[in-house]
């Protein structure tokens, strides 16, 4: 298995000043130092075109 991909920029402000973020509940995500927002990126699956 390969490691998970990291986001390159913040989805809110577009800056690249990101760091890993872990809360007390052990939910992993990312923290943007530019806009002070935390977020998670989730893979939902592969889509099939009909």
Image: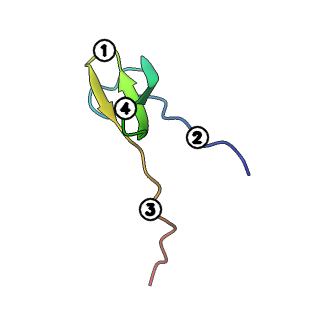
Q: Which residue is mark 2?
A: 5
Q: How many marks?
A: 4
28 or 46, which is in the foreground? 28
Q: Height in image: 14 above or below 6?
A: above
Q: Determine contact: label 3, label 2, CB under 8 Å.
A: no
Q: Determine contact: label 1, label 2, CB under 8 Å.
A: no
Q: Determine contact: label 4, label 1, CB under 8 Å.
A: no
Q: Position of residue 16 (x, y in %)?
A: 43, 20
* Mark 1 and mark 3: Cα distance apart in space: 27 Å
Which residue does the image show at 46% across and 78% down from the upper left? 49
Query: Can you tell which mark lies on residue 10?
Result: none
Which residue does the image show at 48% across and 34% down from the upper left? 7
Q: Which residue is mark 3?
A: 44
Left or right, 10 with reference to 49: left
Q: Determine contact: label 1, label 3, CB under 8 Å.
A: no
SS of the residue at dot 2?
Answer: loop
Label 3 vs label 4, nearer the camera:
4
Compare marks 1 and 2 and give the one earlier in the sequence.
2
* Mark 1 and mark 2: Cα distance apart in space: 21 Å
Label 4 vs label 2, nearer the camera:
4
* Mark 4 and mark 2: Cα distance apart in space: 20 Å
Mark 4 neighbour density, 10 Å: few (under 14) some (14–19) many (20 or more): few
Question: Residue 28 appears in which quarter of the rendering?
Answer: top left
Query: Can you tell which mark lies on residue 23?
Result: 4
């Amino acid at each position: 298995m390969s490691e998970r991909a990291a986001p390159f920029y913040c989805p809110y402000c577009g800056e690249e000043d990101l760091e890993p973020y872990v809360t007390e509940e052990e939910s992993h995500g990312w923290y943007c130092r530019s806009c002070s927002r935390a977020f998670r990126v989730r893979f939902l699956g592969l889509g099939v075109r009909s």
